Amino acid sequence: MINSLIEIRFSKLSHFWMDSGLLGLYKIAKEELPTEMGIEMLLTDECLTFKGTEEGLTTLFNKAYKSLLNQYYSKSTEKQRQENAGFYYDSKEDRFVRFPKVKAMGIAGLIFNKAPRMTVNQVKYEIVDLKEAGKKVTKKKVLPQEYSHLQNRLDNFLQETGLKISGNNLLIDGPNAIQPQVEIKVKKGKNKGKCFICGESSHSLTEVGGTVYPMITGSSGVLSFNSNGGKPEKVCWKCDFLGKFVPVNGFYVYNNESYNIYLPYSSSLIKMSESYDDFKALKIDDPNLLKNFENRLGGFFQRPFEQLFTFLYSLYLTVLSKKTTDEDSHELDFEKLFDVVISKAPLEFYTINTTSLGDTQMGKMIWPFNDSVYLFRLFDKIEKNKISIKEVMSNLIDYDQTKNENKTIIRNAICERILKKSSIIELVEQHAFHINKSKKQNIKPIHDFVIQYEKILKEGNDKVDQAIIDTAVSLGKTIGFSVASAGRKGKGDLFRLRKTRKPEDFLNEINRIQMKYGALVTSDIYGKGEEFEKNFLEFKQFCMIAALNTFNAKNQS
């Protein structure tokens, strides 16, 4: 009976967080070579199954969990590794050993943001008063009686290394580490109720909390105000276990005390597993633990939608594109796109944004982004037109703002609209004139981008056809070229034209510019008639950004 085989099944719950944990368990357990332990492990679209002896399964789960904590929870920054400021006493080798301090960051920090604990044993220091002639009484931490024979060696060790005693206990036979507690209960027992997360009956239940799913505040978060609501809900040991493995599947970036987290997700577990293997190329070890993926658009991305935009662009460049004959340019690899994002089951990205609330993080947004194919093809088409998305993003920073957190408000709004396939001409035109109000700043990157983007967006849409956009841009170039020679006065006329609110006022102002500067305006604008009036605001926005871009270029030359 002791060596009889048992089967442990972790079902896919169609919940992005728990299923990410399920994938994480599969990837970490696979690293522990379960077949050498006599364990059969099978991943299907619906579940992950383990088959083996009770002892073998318990050993595998414990080893996988220990490996998880070492790889994702007990992390050290480069500075912490250089300082190597922690130490413990190794009783077997009879010496003091240094180690770097650790902390949990990223998704792991969101799950469990508590101080590290001892891994083996510890003894508490005693406090003694030291009296020296002519000096005040000072307090010193010394070893207790059973370890007093090590006191001189400890003093010498601290003097040689320059370290200081920072805690109240001396660690014995191992460093401290980040260790969220779990219960691994492979052996079945008496049924104690149903799990709040998966709904299955279980013999081992624990209190539900943020270490299972961070958007649950704790047992009080699932209490009912109804007096008949009963006791707080509980979760089974399997769901509690899976909740700790989510960091394996995720990407994150941390700035301004906020997390932005991205979890690739699919209805198929096998698809998630294959995508994980492809996306590993994007992951990096950041020396400050502020992110775990390579940002291919540069720094200074702060807000949720611009962060998501740069993550997806980085994914596009690193995983889904291939170099062209020109080594400095890329193009979309459609075969790779089909394999990674479309085949077997569609792939989407869950994005989570949190903000600091004291010592904890409060969730602000959970959004499933499922238009990645559109976005990747957009990147490809834009860059094939020789438009640098990196330059566009840099051009959208508002350097006139005094506070750093306000410099990318407009860029975040533009990225949100792009992600949601909405028009951006209004925001781009507003930004272009704002940054050129008291100085001259190049807007060619955003000028080229917005025209190309809007044409792509409106393909097959009768709202504003290609001819209307082309007419507006052509008119804007003519006006910008005509007034450029007048310098500041010409720029003033551009701002005056922009202030018009009605089609007839706009046309009157154009006539005035014609008379004043001898601009040769074609008759196309007058031939559009009803279409011009119907789409006046967008027409004017295209016209004005083209005029300003031409004005700047002419004065620059």
Image: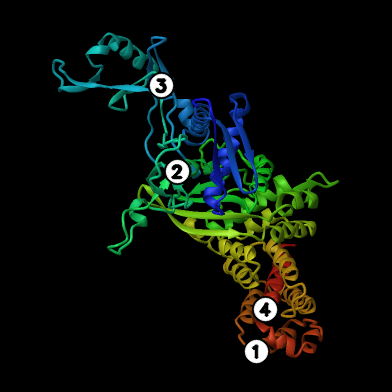
Q: Nearer the viewer, mark 1 or mark 3?
A: 3
Q: Are marks 4 and 3 in contact (CB under 8 Å)?
A: no
Q: Looking at the image, tell me whether mark 1 or mark 4 is earlier in sequence order.
A: 1
Tell me how far mark 4 sits from mark 3, CA to CA.
67 Å
Place of residue 265 in the rendered image (x, y in percent of width and height, measured from the top left): 61, 52
User: Which quadrant is home to the C terminus?
Assistant: bottom right
Q: Are marks 2 and 4 in contact (CB under 8 Å)?
A: no
Q: Nearer the viewer, mark 1 or mark 4?
A: 4
Q: Residues within 10 Å of mark 3 (few under 14, many from 20)?
A: some
Q: Nearer the viewer, mark 3 or mark 2?
A: 2
Tell me how far mark 3 sits from mark 2, CA to CA.
26 Å
Q: Residues within 10 Å of mark 4 (few under 14, many from 20)?
A: some
Label 1 sits on residue: 505
> Is 321 on the left or on the right of 164, as rendered?
right
Tell me how far mark 1 sits from mark 4, CA to CA.
15 Å
Residue furthest toward the right? 325
Residue at 58% over, 28% down: 32
Q: Nearer the viewer, mark 1 or mark 2?
A: 2
Tell me how far mark 2 sits from mark 4, CA to CA.
53 Å
Q: Looking at the image, tell me whether mark 1 or mark 2 is earlier in sequence order.
A: 2
